[in-house]
Amino acid sequence: MTYRRLPPLNAVRAFVAAARHLSFTLAAAELGVTHGAVSHQIKQLEQHLGVSLFTRGVRQIALTASGQELFAGMAPAIELMAATAAAVAKSAPVKGLRINVRASFAARWLIPQLPAFIREFPHISPQVITSDVAPERLGRDTFDIIIRRTKAGWPIDLQPRAFLSDYASAVAAPSLMRAQPIRQLGDLRKHVFLHSETRNDDWQQWLRYAEAEAIAPAGEMRFDHLDFALRAASDGLGIAIGPTTLVAHDIAAGRLCQVFPDINRPLDPYLIATSNRSNVEAMAFMEWVSS
């Protein structure tokens, strides 16, 4: 059987994610790549097909007629490939995989990703272990995979590698934005800023990046942990600054929205390492999250 020339599959994957979210930023967060990488892959796909797939506005994108047609065919095709691979892998024996992460990352990024990983690797049983302890202070027999954002505290032999780019973005409940719309940075003065002690300088850093350091809010609320601040934002109590990796699931579910989609302050990437590079399950997970 002779097959027609296939489009670049990584580009198709980027396109489907961007079309589903109608956001290159959220697609990048889902795929663990940069905004620029998603944009490049979609341009590559457009060149391959000879058509435009998106119309690009100032703060939003929309599918063209060709983009709608492609999404209608490609989204179920990707799901079918994933389901077929999972079905073939079901006969493999189940093995455990201990993944050591911070609690906020586990709740807001890792756990929402695990169903897709388990569908692809049903013979691997992830065990999520939450910890704030630096990698250099953990015994090698206590984890198979470790993920941290920090660049410090890594033993040389662990050889961590960056796998997930990230940005800080202002987020709020869609209901709050409907009740008190924000059209420009100055409108932030009418709103409450939500802070977390675990990331207590996020608002200061974001305002500096947006060249709006003089803006003072109508009020402020403080929480012990970032997760509490983001939950408060989704409940309409104010606006929080959240890493796009940790808010992408809430945005996709309609609980949060980006207040300024074009103002995303770059953050240090997440790093991943394994305690044993001969561990087949650990290497499979590292390749999966990095793909």
Image (cartoon, rainbow, N blue to C red):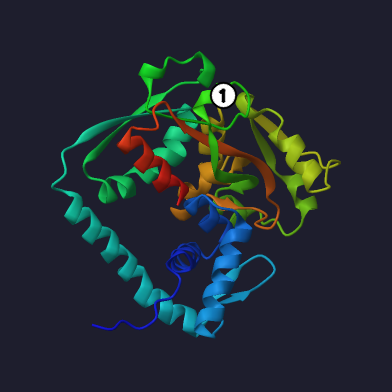
Asked whether the viewer can see residue 238, the reply is no
Q: Which residue is drawn at 52% across and 41% down?
A: 246
Q: Nearer the viewer, residue 263 or 140?
A: 140
Q: Which of 105 and 288 is in front in this view?
A: 288
Picture quarter with the N terminus? bottom left
Q: Residue at x 63, y 60 (%)?
A: 36
The x and y percentages for residue 203 are 72, 37
The amino acid type of the residue labelled 1 equals Ile
In the depicted structure, whether residue 244 falls above or below residue 66: above
In the depicted structure, whether residue 134 falls above or below residue 109: above
Q: Quadrant of residue 113?
A: top left
Numbered label tally: 1
The x and y percentages for residue 162 are 56, 40
Report the side of 80 relative to 191 (left or right).
Answer: left
The x and y percentages for residue 235 are 51, 41
Asked whether the viewer can see residue 195, the reply is yes
Report the side of 262 relative to 65 (left or right).
Answer: right
Label 1 sits on residue: 156
Q: Residue furthest left?
A: 91
Q: Which residue is drawn at 47% across and 32% down?
A: 273
Q: Quadrant of residue 134?
A: top right
Q: What element carries label 1?
A: helix
Q: Nearer the viewer, residue 76 or 235?
A: 76
The x and y percentages for residue 205 are 75, 37
Q: Nearer the viewer, residue 282 or 25?
A: 282
Q: Residue furthest right?
A: 214
Q: Residue at x 13, y 47 (%)?
A: 91
In the depicted structure, whether residue 192 falls above or below residue 173: above
Report the side of 254 relative to 180 (left or right).
Answer: left
Local packing at callout 1 (Cα closer than 10 Å; few below 14, some 14-19, many 20+) is few
